[in-house]
Amino acid sequence: MTTLKSLMVPHRIVMMLLFAALVLWCALSLRWDWIPKYAPLALEGLWTTIWILALTTVLGFLLAVPLGLAQAIGPWYLSIPARTFCTIIRGTPLLLQIWLLYYGLGSLFPQFPWIRSSELWPYLRQAWPYAVLALTLSYAGYEGEVMRGAFSGVAKGQLEAAKSFGMRRFTMFRRIWLPQAVRNVLPTLGGETILQLKATPLVATITVIDIYAVSSRVRSDTFIVYEPLLLLALVYMVIAGLITLAFKRFENQVAR
Amino acid sequence: MPTAASAEPSPEPDTLGEAIQVEDLHKSFGSLEVLKGVSLNARKGDVVAIIGGSGSGKSTMLRCINFLETPTSGKITIDGEQIEMNADGSPANRRQIERIRTRLAMVFQQFNLWTHRTLLENVIEVPVHVLKVSRAEAIAQARVLLDRVGLGDKADTFPAYLSGGQQQRAAIARALAVDPNVMLFDEPTSALDPELVGEVLTVIRDLAAEGRTMLLVTHEMKFAREVANHVVYLFEGRIEEQGPPAEVFGNPQSARLKQFLSSVA
């Protein structure tokens, strides 16, 4: 930990003063009067960013586990599709994936009357399901590859020990294999989750109002360009910092 | 404290029945035939030491008994129950294998304690999640076992913080937690620093003295002679010689065994 004393050295004091001056200058000479008006919308956008991030990383990870497992030990009829999926997802831009799902799939659906009349239609006509689907598949694609390595990396003896005591395969997977695999890749998963956070603004391109979309809205309404972007940068940095902290905590808990 | 087993076979094992019968076991890895027809019987209470040079197939034989390796052919009977095998030697009935494995506890050369769990969690893992013993009961029993192997104060420690000798003793506690009918030791001291071998051998010696049935693959000839009541010498996938330790070590017949014993002495 950095202590107060260790900060009180000349070069650090100068840096801190410079930073304080920068913040002060930002606060005083830039325009922030638009904030009160847009605060409610910004909060909604922030919430959208956060739940999309949380939902897609959780769902994506749940998909990544079978994808990784299929590639690590699956028979060819599972491992080849899994590898193909991961290759396609990792080999194409996320923006393209979002657009293909939204403009492609999203415009196909209305042509089928049975879909239009189904219970799901109120959702399918909105944009966010396509955003969630695209981001989930993307996270699954990248993490499927990470989990493949994680599963292969668990020492054989750990599984042999479980086997030798008559542990059933699913119990062994749940109690030994998966926890050890996840533990080994937690730092990677933390980094990937931050990448996922920074991928979320793409959903604004299909009309989902996340925090980035709000900042664009401010810009087009008020012609104020830099201030909303600066604040946006700060918001993403804070969220990324929180993710880092959360994963650090988790790592410390499981790292023995 | 040497036991009486050094000179005499353990008391009347005949009346107790067969624990393990291996008949004409073959195992090949690709074109390399590691086991070329091994037969072995162990009665309840027997301590069978399996010795031989590296590559003689002794570990492979042990691992075939609980099907960590799939035999190529042969017949394996545990407690009178023959393991159902397909024509290619693979187990025909997964549930049967899993059930039989719960009665055969294995102790590995590399300990193989689960690194993400404390010693106590390691010891209760199989009772709770395989044998479905209640957690409280399993914990109480685990504490007794850890005390017994001299690790009572390390119950909440993770394996990585322990010496090899301590890890191996914990692994023995984990094996004992399933109250196995037969214990399989796969070179339990080969990965240990010389000064740690003794503490593990002491634990195994106690188990032998209390009449546990065990198969022990080992390089510790003195120890084998002391605790085993039957010694099997494997050479290139065949049993070259076997018998009571006094005979095998004291009066070896085959030239290869003589040479082997003089090379490890």
Image: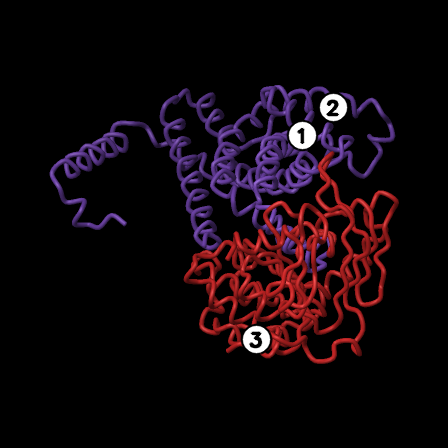
Chain colours: A purple, B red
Q: What's under tag 1, amino acid-wise?
A: Tyr
Q: Position of residue A256 (x, y in %)?
A: 45, 55
- Labels 1 and 3 in the same subunit: no
What is the chain identity of the residue bearing mark 1?
A
Lateral position of residue A20 relative to residue A53, left or right: left
Callout 2: few (<14), some (14-19), or many (20+) C-alpha neighbours within 10 Å? Answer: few
Q: Position of residue B6 (x, y in %)?
A: 59, 74
Q: CA distance from mark 2 to mark 1?
A: 9 Å
Q: What's under tag 2, amino acid-wise?
A: Leu
Lateral position of residue B146 relative to residue B137, left or right: left
Q: Residue at x 70, y 67 (%)?
A: B182
Q: Residue at x 62, y 19 (%)?
A: A96
- Tag 1 or tag 2, which sits nearer the N-term? 2
- Labels 2 and 1 in the same subunit: yes
Lateral position of residue B16 relative to residue A66, left or right: right
Q: What's under tag 3, amino acid-wise?
A: Asp
Q: Which residue is mark 2?
A: A105
Q: Which residue is mark 1?
A: A130
Q: Nearer the viewer, mark 2 or mark 3?
A: 3
Q: Secondary structure at mark 2?
A: helix
Q: Which residue is mark 3?
A: B206
Q: Nearer the viewer, mark 1 or mark 3?
A: 3
